[in-house]
Structure formats: C-alpha cells, structure tokens
Amino acid sequence: MRSGRLFGLGLVLLIVVVTAATYWSGLRGQFLNWDDGVLFTKNPDYRGLGPAQLRWMFTTILAGHYMPLTWLTLGLNYTLGGMNPWGYHLVALILHATNAVLFYLVAVRLLGTVRAGSHGEAPSASTGEGGWSVQVGAFVAALVFALHPQRAESVAWVTERGTLVSSALYLLAVLAYLRATARGPEVAWRWWGTASLVSFGAAILAKGMVITLPATLLILDFYPLRRWEGRWRHALREKVPYAAIALMGAAIVLSARIRGAQWSGLADYGLEARLAFVAYGLWFYPSSFVWPIGLSPLYEAPLRAGLGEWRFLAPVIGLAAVTVVLVAVRHRFPGGLAAWINGAVVVAPVSGIAQSGSQLVSDRYSYLAGLGFALIAGYAIPWAADLRRRGRIGRGVAATAAGALVLVLFGLALGAAGQTGIWHDSETLWRWAVDRDPECATCQAGLGEAVLYVPDGAQSRLGEAEAYLRRAIALRPILPFPRYTLGTLFLVSGRYAEAEDSLTTYMRLAPGEPQGPARLALVYLVQDRPAEAARLLVRSQQLGARPPSQAPGGAGLDEGSRPDFAEALRLVGDNLDDLEFLGRTLLQQGRPQQAAQVLGRAVALAPEATTPRALLVKAYQLSGRTELARHEAAALRRLDPAAVDPLSVR
C-alpha cells in the first residue's frame, strides 16, 4: 500500500513537471488586444483586494460574465505582481497543472472502477485505488488532457482565467462525489456530498460554463459507477440539489449575457443555420481532439449557413454514424458512448443555438468536454495489462504499443508548446489566425489593430494596418470594430476628415458603445474644436453609465457653453487609451505643451505603463523641459531596463 502511494506521488510530480515544461514558454506572453484590454490593462477596478475591489468583483458583470471568484484570483495577481503579465501567466500554468493532478485523482477512481467491473467485482468508486496499471492509466489520461494542443488557449490567454478556476472547482466537485458514493448505494451527504455541492456552486461563481455538471454525474452513475441499474429514480432524486444549483447558475449566466454581451437572435440566421452550427460544434470538439491540426484562435461564424452545405452536412453525417456505432457496441464499449454523450452535454450551452460573439466554435470550450476521451486513452493501459497477463498479447506487441503511446504524448506536448507560442503577442496571434482563414474578418481586424498598436511603431506600418482593416471591412461591412480602429489610424495619421467619417460609421453600427463618441471627440480636440469634443465626451460618459456630473474634473456642460481645450480634456477622464492617442497625435502636430498635459495624466493613471511615459519624455524634451524629460526617462528605465532610449522616441 505504501509503495503504491509513493508510486502515485511520483506520477503526480511527473504530471506537474511535464505540464510546466510544455507551457513554460507561455510565461513570456504579453497581454493581448482580444479582451485583455477591457478586462485588465484598461480596467483599474479589479486591481487589489480592498473593500472597493471586492465590492466591484461581487457586483459587476463585465464582458458578459459574472465571475467573482475568478476576479479574486486576478486581484491577488495584481496585489503580488502588479501589471506584469508574467505573474498572470504563471498562475494560469499553476492552475492548469493543478487541474491535471485533480483529473489524475478522478481518473484513478474511475479507471479502478471500470477494471473492477471487468473482473466481475461489484463496481464501486472505492475500488479505484488499486493496481499499478490503473495508476499509470490515470497518469496517461491526465497527460492527454494536460498536453493536448486545445489546452493552449486556456493556459496562454490571460482572459481565460475563468475556465481554469471553474474547472478546478468542477473537478473537486466530481472527486468529492466519487468519494461520497464510494461506500455504498447512498450518497454520503454529511461530508463529501456537501463538499461536492459547495464546490459546484463555487465553480459557477468562477465561470458559468460548468452548469452541466449534474448531467455529467448522471452519466457517471450510468457508467462506470453503474449506480443507475435498478435505482434510476433514486439517482435522479440525488441530483435535485445539483439541479437547483445549476438552475440558479443558468439564471446568472443568462442575466450576465443579456446585460453584458450581444446575442445573435434566431432571426439573424434562421433555425436551419442554428442547427447547422450545433452539428458543426458537436462534431468539431471530438474530431479536433483526435486530430488537433490547424487550430486557430478564432473560428468565425459565417454570415449564412445551411445544412445542405458540405461544411455542415459532413458533421451531421459524422455525428449520426459515430452515434449509431457507439450505440451498437455499447455493451462491449460503454465508455465510448458515455464519453461521446458527455462531450456533447458539456458544450451544449455554447453549441450554437444561443449564439453570442463572432465565434462558431472555440478551443477553450473543449477544456472539460475532452475529459471523457482522455479517460478512454488512459484505460488502454489497464486493458493492455490485463491482456498481457492472460497471454493474449506478446512482449513485443506491448513494447511497440508503449513506444507508440510515448510518441503520441510527445507529439501532443510539441503541438501544445507550439500552439502556446502563437499566443505570445497580438500580432503573432492574429497573423496565425489570418493564415488559417484569410476570409476571417474579425481576424483581419485584430491583426490591423495589433500592427497599429505596436508601441512606438514606425509610420511605415500604418499602411500595413490600414490594408488589414480595409480587408476586414470588405469581408464584413457590418462589423463595427474595424471602423473604430480605422478611425483611430486616420487620427494618428492626421487624416481627420476620414477619421470623422469612419468613426461616425462606427457609431451608427454600434450606437450603444461609449468608445465611438469618445474617439471622435479626440479628432475634434486635435482640430481645436473643444466644444464639439466636450459634447461627445459627455455623450460617451452617458453611454458608459457614468453621469457627466461625476466625470473627473467637474460637472457636465450647460447649453451654449464654449469649453476650452483644458475643460474638454477633463472630460476625457481616465481612459488611458484615449489619453495616449491624443498625446501621440498632439506630438505629431507639434503641440508638445498640450501633449505633455495629456500624457502626464496618462502616466499618473498608469504609472507602470511604458508607452505613455516614453511619449511624455519626448513631449518634455520638445517643449524645452529637459530636467523633467530626464526624470521620466530614468523612471522608464527602472520600469523596463531593456527599453530603447526614450529620448530617441520618434
């Protein structure tokens, strides 16, 4: 018994080491221009664990999610390491390795139960501790899960913290349930059962994707626990507390999506298109688990779809064929059917019927959906060990199979490491996405923004960014985001009439977004039209749910007032992005005094940001304030010793 536990501990340590080695390069990743800005780099509200931050975490819906427990981990990140992305990536890696270990513990119990049942013993989760083959099988299952290239998105993208935290709590809930059902037919509610329910509730407060856990537990009751046989009514009654928590979680998820994100109604596509999306999604996740080649950060939903198109008809045929086969062999291979159904259940909330966002499918949704398939891979070990014991396979065959398994795991690790590198920075990310799908308008727009926002990028790259943005608009004219970025590019380039036209179009396509009038206000500010700018800034603040009277610097504007530049600037408030672009543009116009005024506020708001400080150095230098320029240059070198000499910033 002691040697078995030591062996298991060694496998756990090896899981952690291999997982860390695979994703280690992700620690060098940056914040990305895909939700990281809204959630982190431009969001001061989560930074810390004080009363104000905690109140915000538990009362705020942001980007369509209510996830206070995830925000707690992010607030801790900031408390310990500020805005250095390295710390955020480190915690993500630790969480993923933890999930791999938790899944190993779950797999030990489930594979042990399957093995006991195949030997004619009474199936019970308590039998899941025995046998080196079970432990090695669980080890393989954990590595298949942890090293799969589909995991890279959740590990390497800071925005995906919610998936990692909720999955850890989800796995704890499953593990506690297995312990609660280990001693007999009744659930031991006093300790383990209660722990399972609490973990499930906490998982929903980390991210609502986990609401399908009650269905997963029913599938486990069916196989491998076989608690369903002769007691199905009892098994259903046991899930009532889980179902109650899931219903409350579903209400939270729906409310958050309605308040914080845009749904695509059935009228936008039609029922046939929705069914096509569902079929595509249900096929995508298991098929890409088997063949994880050509993964992309974004699989953009088409403008139109139908079940008659081969892209969607093929998944329908594949789903029907695989389902028929698995049902036919369910008595000999029940685990295959259980894993197949569970995978579909887990992704059901994001399967396409209720479309939100531009994605058709996403690798991140596979984080929990692939656990059943990983278990099947792990079961190959105890199954092969039993065959070897009976003399059904020879030593040579066993050695060849073991070597093939090692090669598969090594290939998965290489694929995951390569996929992690794609998420290093925004330009690399979107360039890869555009290479995978040149017709992806959102990818083209993301790449255009990434090129535009390269810190202190040369003017020569503005043309490159403009080409990507115009391509995005040509592909999908109703997409608002590239219009906004193109307007920003025109602002930086001094093409103010074109900037005004592009931003006006953006405001028409996205009338409820506050950033449109705020960016158009900057166009007016740099043209010495402060009154028009101020009125747009007030409108932006109203759309952003902050009354003008609460804007930094004072009250709103009276009818007929004619504010000057300083008064309009006060209304810009604490939008770091707007301040940075306004300061950059004023520098290009040869107005260093006003640029210093703007950039000084940006530096005060974000003292750890390097780009506004580098621009402030130049503004001080051009306005003849040499001592202030040297002071800020020294501060910049302390923030980033590898930074270029800020006095040479153009």
Image (cartoon, rainbow, N blue to C red):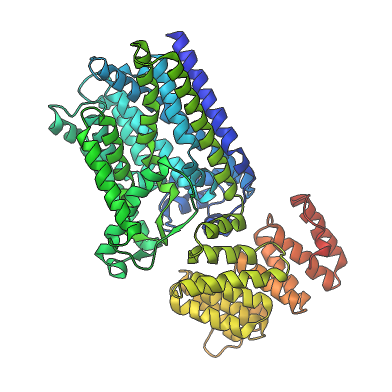
Residue at image location 85% in from the left, 69% down from the top: 625
Residue 212 visible, this angle: yes
Q: Residue 263's spot in the image, x, y percent?
A: 35, 64
Residue at image location 61% in from the left, 66% down from the top: 577
Residue at image location 66% in from the left, 84% down from the top: 527
- Report whether 103 appears left or right of 500: left
Q: Nearer the viewer, residue 2 or 315?
A: 315
Q: Nearer the viewer, residue 429 or 52?
A: 429
Image quadrant in which the C terminus is located: bottom right
Q: Nearer the viewer, residue 204 or 393?
A: 393
Image quadrant in which the N terminus is located: top left
Please say if 53 is above or below 125.
below
Q: Residue 631's spot in the image, x, y percent?
A: 82, 59
Please say if 509 is above or below 302.
below
Q: Residue 550's spot in the image, x, y percent?
A: 52, 70
Query: Looking at the rendering, which quadrant does residue 378 occupy?
Result: top left
Query: Looking at the rendering, which quadrant does residue 175 occupy?
Result: top left
Please say if 221 is above or below 256.
above
Mark count: 0
Q: Residue 585's spot in the image, x, y percent?
A: 70, 75
- Report whether 115 appears left or right of 621: left
Residue 548 visible, this angle: no
- Report whether 281 appears left or right of 478: left
